Amino acid sequence: MKFDCSVDEEFDRGLLAAQAALEEGKLVVLPTDTVYGLAADAFSPRAVQNLLDAKGRGRDMPPPVLVGAPTTLDALAVDIPTWLRSMVEALWPGPLTIICHQQPSLTWDLGETHNTVAIRMPDDKRALALLKQTGPLAVSSANTTGEPAAQTIEQAQDMLGGRVAVYLDGGPTSSGVPSTIVDATGTTPRVLRQGAVPLDVLHTFNNTIEPADEPSTEAPSTEAPTTEPPGSDDSSAEDPA
């Protein structure tokens, strides 16, 4: 099912359909402020596996988590430094993905996360509307392995087809530039992927943040690695939308 988000009544029906699909362990494609995202219930191992299968990925690339409010951060992560809290307060919602140690009490299975979690709050009212209904969602970029992330609903449909239950059509995404990924789990914080938030802005919150090994702001890659292994943009987490 596809719903046009530009028509209020249809968008409302789409939200209800998306919420119902997610509760059943099915997949939803939704617009974000970067690229289209492929969403699943983060607390359903079956749903997360469906997401990985749809993209052609293994458990070694766990999906990031999108949240609808900054206050959700403490429910998902621990050992959050003061500078990172200030960064989140200033830059969320927006194209900033942070990698933290996950709450040990969480009963989810996102894959081989090494006890970390990649978290972002998107700056898109349609995505936020869904997140406020569902709570945190596992969301990867809407594409299959080796293909660019979808920037239109048609591109997402061409790649994912019937593996997705609900498509929320928000028109072309406003930016194909991926989020900047900051890993805050080590002794020295570092950028794992340079995206829409430049390093000089990050340094206003912590001037010890190390730059990415290979900075990139190209649209096709939107994936958020966790902390293993160092220096790899693709080894242990999927693209955050």
Image: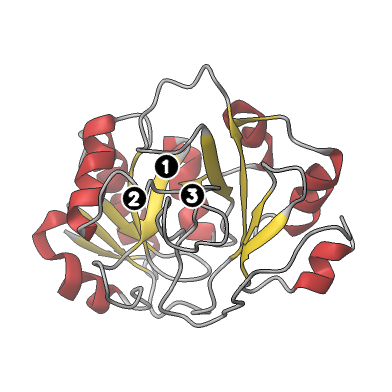
Three-letter amino acid code at disc 3?
Ala
**Taking 115 as reference, is 93 left or right?**
right
Identify which residue, 120 or 207, lies in the foreground: 207
Image quarter in which the C terminus is found: bottom left
Residue 67 is at least partly visible in this image? no
- Look at the picture and state if 54 lies above or below 159: above
Query: Residues at badges 1 and 2 in contact (C-beta under 8 Å)?
Result: yes
Q: Quick one: label 1, few (<14), some, or many (20+) residues within 10 Å?
A: many
Q: Quadrant of residue 75?
A: top right
Q: Secondary structure at mark 2?
A: strand
Query: Residues at badges 2 and 3 in contact (C-beta under 8 Å)?
Result: no
The circle on residue 39 is: 2
Q: Mark 1 highlights which residue?
A: 137
The circle on residue 129 is: 3
Estimate the x, y position of residue 88 in percent, counting from the top left.
Answer: 74, 50
Three-letter amino acid code at disc 1?
Leu
Name which residue lies at 36% across and 67% down.
7
